[in-house]
Amino acid sequence: MHVHDHLRSERIGMPEAVLCSAKTDRQLVAIVDDLSQGGVSSLLTRLPAERLDRLPEIATRLNHDAVSETAVLGSPQPARSGDVAIVAAGTSDQQVAAEAAQTLAFSGFRSRSFIDVGVAGLWRLEARLPEIREADVVIVAAGMDAALVSVLGGLLAAPIVAVPTSVGYGVAEGGTTALNSALASCAQGITVVNIDNGFGAACAAVRMLSVRSFSAGETPS
């Protein structure tokens, strides 16, 4: 029996989400069937294209994005006010950044992505800072030493959500160094989510933007 939180959107302003990597093909098909029958829109994460190819019984019902490895069942949330900048240190961090972007889009929020603006080429970051400063919340995806997190933490007033990524080798392999670096940042007030968790970073941004929406009299859709 599959029991889903069909009232999550009304209660906390965020949609039903399904982590596909932790489920068998049979479980995933049953879950999508259940959500479809209930008319519940949902975001599916950690769903690579090669796995979806094995599941033709659900593939036609999903709008899949290969870069982010996410899929949408049903319709996104209605548009909501708030802009997010997603800043990725390198092109290798793009999958995590894309997962954040797709989660935000499904949740009804606009985002812009700035890829390959890490500390190895600070001039590239400097050139994009005016655009990044326009955002209400900034998500930073960075691997290796995750230095970009502290750099932006010292330059921006907007809330920052750091996503350490597993991009790296040697002592940086697996993302633990990036995670520790983000947690140890001397820039005040940075929120840090788990390694490679673009979905979680986007959800943190949604919560931050929702507080502003509630104070303006809006309600979660």
Image (cartoon, rainbow, N blue to C red):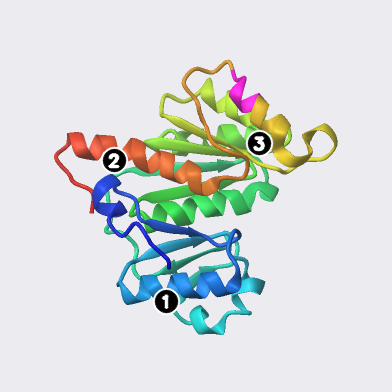
Categorize mark 2 by other alpha carbons within 10 Å: few (<14), some (14-19), many (20+).
many
Q: How many marks?
A: 3
Gap in Å between the C-alphas at discs 3 and 2? 29 Å
Q: Main secondary structure of the magenta part?
A: helix
- Left or right position of 143 against 156: right
Q: Is label 1 in a helix, a strand or a loop?
A: helix
The residue located at (45%, 39%) in the rendering is: 131
Gap in Å between the C-alphas at discs 2 and 1? 30 Å
Residue wearing tag 3: 118
Which quarter of the figure has residue 144? top right
Q: Residue furthest right?
A: 170
Residue wearing tag 1: 33
Q: Is residue 2 magenta?
A: no
Gap in Å between the C-alphas at discs 1 and 3? 42 Å
In this rendered view, identify the residue nearer to me: 158 or 1: 1
Categorize mark 3 by other alpha carbons within 10 Å: few (<14), some (14-19), many (20+).
many
Q: Quarter holding the N terminus?
A: bottom left
Which numbered disc, 1 or 3, marks the residue closer to the eye? 1
Query: Over which residues does the magenta segment extend?
Result: 181-185
Of the two numbered discs 1 and 3 on the same chain, state the one appearing first in sequence.
Answer: 1
Residue wearing tag 2: 210
Please state which amino acid type lies under the numbered disc 1.
Asp
Query: Percent position (x, y) of residue 104?
Result: 41, 51
In this rendered view, identify the residue nearer to me: 215 or 118: 215
Q: Residue furthest left?
A: 217
Label 2 with label 1: CB-CB less than 8 Å: no
